[in-house]
Amino acid sequence: MKSQKTRTVPNRGRNTPSSASEIRSNRKSGQPQTMNDTELSPRRRLAAAGTRVDAFCQHVNELFIPLHVEVQDRVSFNGQLQVVPLGALSLSEIALCGTTSFRTTPQTIARTAHDYLKVDLVLSGRCRVAQDGREAVLNSGDFVMYDGTRPFRLVGENSLHLYGLVIPAPLLGLSRTHILELTARRFGGQRGTAALASQFLRQLGAQLAVKGQTNNFHVADATLSLLTGVFSDHPKPMGNSRELLLRIRVFIENQLGDPRLDVAQIAAAHHISVRQLQKMFKDDGQTVTGWIRSRRLEHCRRDLSNIALADMTVGQICLRWGFIDAAHFSKIFKAVLGLPPRDFRAQAQEIAADETRSRICEARFAIDSSGAAG
């Protein structure tokens, strides 16, 4: 199991925040937020600041994702990055003092091993995210999605505190066309499903910050489902064609266990031609068979992660979701998720068992503490 990863930028100053909570406390109290020692000579202060900024940049690339980091005022800069695993996702917390920008370059993109999306929620401060010719300005409670494998730029103005999720793109279940419509758009945390997601991400980040880490796949799945629901509503479906596509996807979801499900059956059930059906999915950046396969794989992934289904064999699970050839299923599962089904299951259920034991220990400690207090 991965351990919690927290790095505070090394410094030599005496009035230096040592944690994200102290950074936030200093913001409220008005205490100095600089990391430099004012007694150092200007040359030594600049040298120390350069070391500090370089260390932060190195931590970003080691613990987070490959990015180019630029700091406006290297002398007064302060920053902390914490990354914890969340099932197949990862959650990060960044606290910054000083205007800082993060962007991809051809070099950082080339070093990115996986196709991933990033969702950032602003807890305090203000930032700007630009991608695909758009720029979103975010304040406290707002969140944004962007594609980490393509050019983007994030600028934190002055002090910034945010939570971020790194999500393997296939797990979100959105077409490339849809993703291109969603990047660098502000999702306000004031009303609707976006407000629900904002509060959920805020509480999720706070819990992980306290507990240190969790590999709970069910929480990760709940997070993915909520975000998929929010993003599926934006932009709003327009016209009968879009509504029909949504009905077709619901039909497919309910028939995934039928290995005979095919394009002709789906078209006939909705009184359209096969050609019309294929064009609808193509216009949305998908294929019909590709959508069916991705939904079946997602359900298999969830079942393999579920410790309550440990008695079911891999073959039974793949058959349950319409895969009749276990060898073919194993091949495409590994191609998409990086591990054969049996290895993925062993890893996921070991994590789930560790979490169960941890909760039991916490409950026993609480009971013992209660008894001692009485």
Image (cartoon, helix red, strand yellow):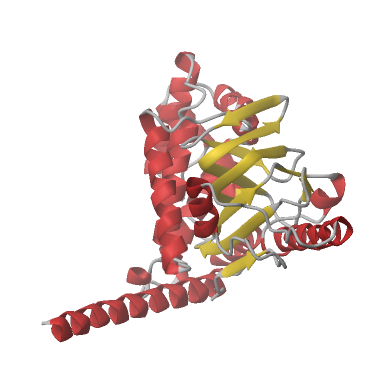
* Residue visible at 37% across and 71% down in the picture: 307
In the image, farthest residue toward the right: 43
The residue lying toward the viewer, choosing from 151 and 345, is 151
Q: Quadrant of the C terminus?
A: bottom left
The residue lying toward the viewer, choosing from 260 and 94, is 94
Quadrant of the rendered image containing residue 196: top left
> Can residue 321 be seen at all in this image of the molecule?
no
Q: Position of residue 117 (x, y in %)?
A: 62, 45
Using the image, determine if residue 115 lies above or below residue 128.
below
In the image, farthest residue toward the left: 374
* Residue visible at 68% across and 50% down in the picture: 115
Q: Position of residue 54 (x, y in %)?
A: 80, 60
Q: Position of residue 71 (x, y in %)?
A: 77, 46
Whether residue 335 sits left or right of residue 272 in the image: it is right
Using the image, determine if residue 197 lies above or below residue 20.
above
* Residue visible at 44% across and 47% down in the picture: 201
